[in-house]
Image (tube, rainbow, N blue to C red):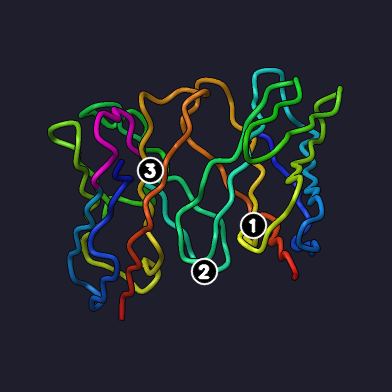
Amino acid sequence: GAGVSQTPSNKVTEKGKYVELRCDPISGHTALYWYRQSLGQGPEFLIYFQGTGAADDSGLPNDRFFAVRPEGSVSTLKIQRTERGDSAVYLCASSTQGGVSNEQFFGPGTRLTVL
Amino acid sequence: DAKTTQPPSMDCAEGRAANLPCNHSTISGNEYVYWYRQIHSQGPQYIIHGLKNNETNEMASLIITEDRKSSTLILPHATLRDTAVYYCIVRKGGSEKLVFGKGTKLTVNP
């Protein structure tokens, strides 16, 4: 079946602009995660949704970052007033219901470049 | 979450077993050991996880020492497609976040 999809695959923007990154999880998965990966580093956790609610947003770096999942399926990561340091690959993952026995399935990521 | 230590890189000949070590000396009783891998330009892929017993699936085997301070991921017959960065992660039961380090870059050579 279809895996996790993310759009766009690449996004180039200018410093100070607003961007939205979209994640379509695997159908029926209630848990959804956002991570970001800088060059040469492992992915870094940003936020976790269980259904429509953000159950853990402890990884969001500051209030310029916000994520929503209004219907418990598609999620959007929103970044305001982008900075060059926000350049990274943003990864989305989903899981059947979360928990230690449920693997996280990752999408291919969105490569964000802030000029 | 407990910190993990992995060698930055390893090489393996195609068809041979690849044994990837991981140290997690500060692991606590309710923390699981997970392995993911990331092939170039793709998202991470789950491989296997365990608590204290050895585990095996169609991809790999996970050997956890009795004191749980270290583990080894074994790919029994490595292929060129196994070239990737392998991440060892210690995850607390009840926590949803995966804390990735820099991993081990495994190169399988023909």
Quarter of the image containing the N terminus of chain A?
Answer: top left
Mark 1 and mark 3 in contact (Cβ < 8 Å)?
no
Across and down, in percent, residue B53 comes to 75, 20
Q: Which residue is drawn at 47% across and 27% down?
A: A102
Q: What residue type is labelled 3?
A: Ala
The magenta stretch spans which residues? Answer: A24-33
Asked if B97 appears above or below A12 in the picture, the reply is above
Residue A45 image-quadrant placement: top left
Which one is in front, B101 or B54? B54
Asked whether the residues under marks 2 and 1 belong to the same chain, the reply is: no
Which residue is at 39% across, 51% downward?
A61
Q: Residue B82 carries which label?
A: 1
| Residue B1 visible in the current orientation | no
- Identify the disc placed on residue A25: none
Q: Residue A93 carries which label?
A: 3
Give the foreground label among 3 and 1: 1
* Same chain, labels 3 and 2: yes
Give the spatial CA distance, label 2 vs label 1.
Answer: 21 Å
- Label placed on residue A39: 2
